[in-house]
Image (cartoon, helix red, strand yellow):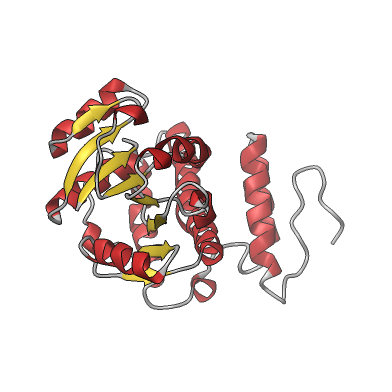
Amino acid sequence: MTITLVGAGNLATSLAPALVQAGHRIMAVVSRTTASAASLAERVGAKACTSVEQLPASDACIFSVTDDALPGLVARLCPRHPEALFLHTAGSVSIDLFRGHAKRFGVLYPMQTFSRIKAIDFSTIPIFVEANSDATLQVVGELAHTLSTDVRTLSSADRLRLHIAAVFSCNFTNHCMTLADRMMREAGLDFHLLMPLIRETFRKLEQMPPAEAQTGPAARGDKGVMRKHLDMLDDVTMRRIYADMSESIMAKAPLFPSPLSPKGQEGSE
């Protein structure tokens, strides 16, 4: 398949080489910045563009840009290539975005966290697909199967639920790691001291449901320890996160139903 790639960010930087490795040809890469377009285009032997008006015709056009940028780009590009297949890669954007702009359209959503500096094996990534017709879905599915062995059809509504779950399990988790890293640095400690704990935390999830794997002071209702932790946290945001997370954990434990209040607002026991 000949493919035009709109976007040169984290996902596009991983997707473009994977498409080429799967036997497809990237005709062009378009990005708002010349450097980004040129860098990715050079890697995959494509034309670098900074405007959708410069894009050559291709079998398919894949949008890999921010959700806010999608509507404008779709409206500008789709009418210029009426016979092409148009796909977006967003977890939280409905397929309906293309209606009224394209004849053949769908979604190719690889559920994974991507970074420019880290290569990733696409063959193990679950890819969720959707299309505006059965015939188009077959084409999108075949394209997805050239990238991954795990391809599933999913509606826009269920994909949005999946995306929210992905944000909790990946993005929020990583932010907690960022906060932990900051605390360790402030104490003059190396973040990598936590790595055995982090690895075991995720290993357990391979063997049991997350709720059963939960440990810590909130899981056992140890309010004394939690208050000590809160007293040590000077950052208001970190205190609020700690209190809210602890309250959420405790709410799942029937023996300890009382919520944990922020510092200075504790209720009576």
* Closer to the camera in the image, 207 or 180: 207
Residue 180 in view of the camera: yes
Residue 203 horizontal/vertical position (percent): 35, 68
Q: From the viewer's perspective, is residue 165 above or below residue 238?
A: below
Residue 168 horizontal/vertical position (percent): 53, 56
Residue 167 horizontal/vertical position (percent): 50, 53
Residue 124 horizontal/vertical position (percent): 25, 64
Q: Residue at x 45, y 46 (%)?
A: 177
Image quadrant assignment for residue 205: bottom left
* Closer to the camera in the image, 99 or 69: 99
Q: Residue at x 34, y 60 (%)?
A: 199
* Closer to the camera in the image, 24 or 115: 24
Image quadrant assignment for residue 11: top left
Q: How many marks?
A: 0
Left or right of 165? Residue 245 is: right
Q: Quadrant of the C terminus?
A: bottom right
Q: Residue at x 33, y 47 (%)?
A: 62
Q: From the viewer's perspective, is residue 142 above or below residue 35?
A: below
* Closer to the camera in the image, 268 or 7: 7
Residue 203 in view of the camera: no
Q: Residue at x 36, y 73 (%)?
A: 206
